[in-house]
């Protein structure tokens, strides 16, 4: 049965990879794969009640990610409906593509550490799409945003879900992870920037949209500022309450919903509907959310079979060196979700083997967080950006993957050099 589930997962993965050639939405392939993997698990000889309990347990974790994604995307759409990104774009004076690439990438990097890489990737991709007219340019910018968002998220305890897992699990401390991973993380971002910049040398751009705002500028500024404040509030809410991040994003969405309702209270229904949260929800890319659901269901089924832990044990026997092991695991995280991979490692190694703030945990945070950039569906940020810009899987693999891997390897070398020096 184990062999069959691997075959089903690989076939489903290939269906996602060749979405354009098959003319089949990736969400369909992911959902079918997810359900089939769990069906095979049910018939693998385990107790039915145990299997269903496992499914519901994983579904709780998956749902928290999906609701977070839904809330974040809705807030971004609401800001967009109020011309928030046009307001920001109008205040970026440069018309040089190289300068714009650096501005957007560095903002993405630092904002990911404050918010999280998923939300930041959504916001910055939406901003870039409002500024760039050429589709190919937007794809390149989106690729760099994925890399920068994942790089910025790993050095912060609240920037990436796997770093947060290690922080909550006691494997790392907040202060130490920032100190140890900041320099390697920024190199993961800078190297791809240096590689891509020559492509846009001496090129300028015009806005994708006119500078005229569709709404009153004051209203747009209010929603923009409130949206950013409420997104910043999410990690603070998590730290204060210890509730999952999706609770904070839902609270923020609810508050912004009230603000929007008050702001447009006296307007006629016909004029204000396009500015409402209801309209923003209609514009959400639902197939991408369903795709994410299918992928996470598939991976959780593989985890239930015990395959991820078997892989970790095999790697431990094959690659005793923590740097070799961490590098391979980082690349594996671009194929399977890094969340169950890190969860398997937490279960495999206790704090007696690798104590708190050991280099192994810091290195795992770096590699599993940034390794996902190698493939567009290797991270939550990549999946979200893929949905927003309709990025073709094979295009990303040919154009961006090797650039992401160059940054990934450089970050590893910087981490090792830093460890040897200090």
Image (cartoon, rainbow, N blue to C red):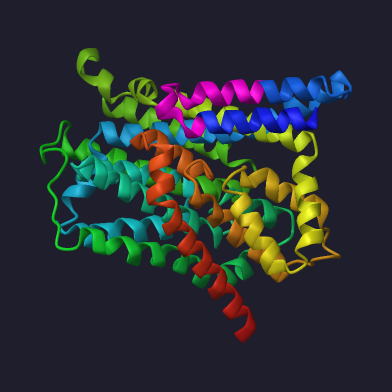
Figure check: 229 above or below 177: above
Q: Residue at x 88, y 23 (%)?
A: 45
Specify start and end residues of the magenta stretch as a single range: 16-35
Q: Would residue 285 be seen by someone viewing this image from the given angle?
A: no
State the image quarter where residue 284 is shown. Answer: top left
Depth order, front residue of 53/12: 12
Depth order, front residue of 146/251: 146
The magenta stretch spans residue 321: no
Depth order, front residue of 330/185: 330
Q: Position of residue 17 (x, y in %)?
A: 49, 34
Q: Position of residue 73 (x, y in %)?
A: 42, 34
- Total numbered labels: 0
Depth order, front residue of 167/336: 336
Figure check: 193 above or below 401: below
Q: Residue at x 86, y 65 (%)?
A: 352
Q: Residue at x 85, y 19 (%)?
A: 48
Figure check: 157 above or below 16: below
The C terminus lies in quadrant? bottom right
Q: Residue at x 51, y 31 (%)?
A: 16
The magenta stretch spans residue 30: yes
Q: Would residue 323 be seen by someone viewing this image from the given angle?
A: yes
Q: Position of residue 313 (x, y in %)?
A: 81, 53
Judge left or right: residue 397 versus residue 327. left
Main SS of residues in magenta: helix
């Amino acid at each position: 049965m184990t062999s069959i589930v691997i075959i089903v997962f690989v076939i489903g993965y290939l269906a996602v990879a060749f979405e354009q050639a098959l003319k089949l939405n990736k969400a369909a392939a992911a959902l079918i794969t997810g359900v089939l993997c769990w069906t095979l698990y049910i018939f693998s000889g385990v107790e039915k009640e145990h299997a269903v309990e496992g499914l519901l347990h994983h579904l709780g974790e998956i749902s928290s990610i999906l609701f977070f994604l839904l809330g974040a995307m809705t807030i971004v759409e609401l800001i967009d409906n109020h011309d928030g990104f046009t307001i920001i774009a109008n205040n970026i004076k440069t018309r040089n593509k190289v300068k714009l690439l650096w501005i957007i990438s560095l903002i993405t990097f630092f904002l990911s550490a404050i918010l999280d890489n998923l939300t930041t990737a959504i916001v910055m991709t939406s901003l870039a799409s409002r500024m760039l007219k050429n589709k190919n340019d937007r794809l390149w910018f989106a690729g760099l945003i994925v890399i920068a968002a994942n790089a910025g998220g790993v050095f912060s305890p609240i920037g990436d879900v796997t770093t947060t897992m290690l922080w909550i699990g006691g494997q790392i401390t907040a202060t130490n992870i920032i100190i140890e991973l900041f320099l390697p993380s920024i190199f993961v971002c800078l190297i791809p920037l240096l590689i891509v910049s020559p492509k846009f040398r001496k090129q300028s751009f015009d806005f994708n949209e006119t500078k005229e705002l569709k709404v009153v500028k004051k209203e747009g500024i209010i929603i923009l500022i409130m949206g950013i404040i409420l997104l910043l509030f999410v990690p603070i809410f998590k730290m204060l309450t210890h509730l999952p991040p999706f609770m904070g994003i839902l609270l923020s969405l609810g508050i912004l919903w009230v603000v929007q309702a008050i702001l447009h209270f006296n307007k006629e229904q016909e004029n204000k509907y396009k500015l409402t949260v209801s309209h923003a929800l209609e514009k959400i890319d639902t197939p991408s959310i369903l795709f994410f659901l299918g992928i996470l269901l598939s991976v959780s089924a593989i985890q239930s079979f015990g395959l991820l832990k078997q892989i970790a044990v095999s790697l431990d026997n094959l690659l005793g060196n923590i740097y070799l092991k961490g590098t391979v695991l980082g690349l594996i995280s671009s194929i399977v979700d890094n969340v169950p991979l890190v969860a398997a490692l937490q279960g495999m190694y206790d704090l007696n083997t690798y104590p708190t703030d050991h280099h192994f945990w810091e290195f795992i945070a770096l590699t599993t967080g940034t390794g996902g950039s190698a493939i567009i569906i290797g991270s939550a940020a990549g999946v979200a950006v893929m949905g927003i810009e309709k990025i073709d899987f094979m295009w990303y693999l040919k154009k961006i993957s090797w650039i992401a891997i160059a940054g990934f390897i450089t970050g590893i070398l910087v981490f090792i050099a830093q460890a040897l020096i200090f």
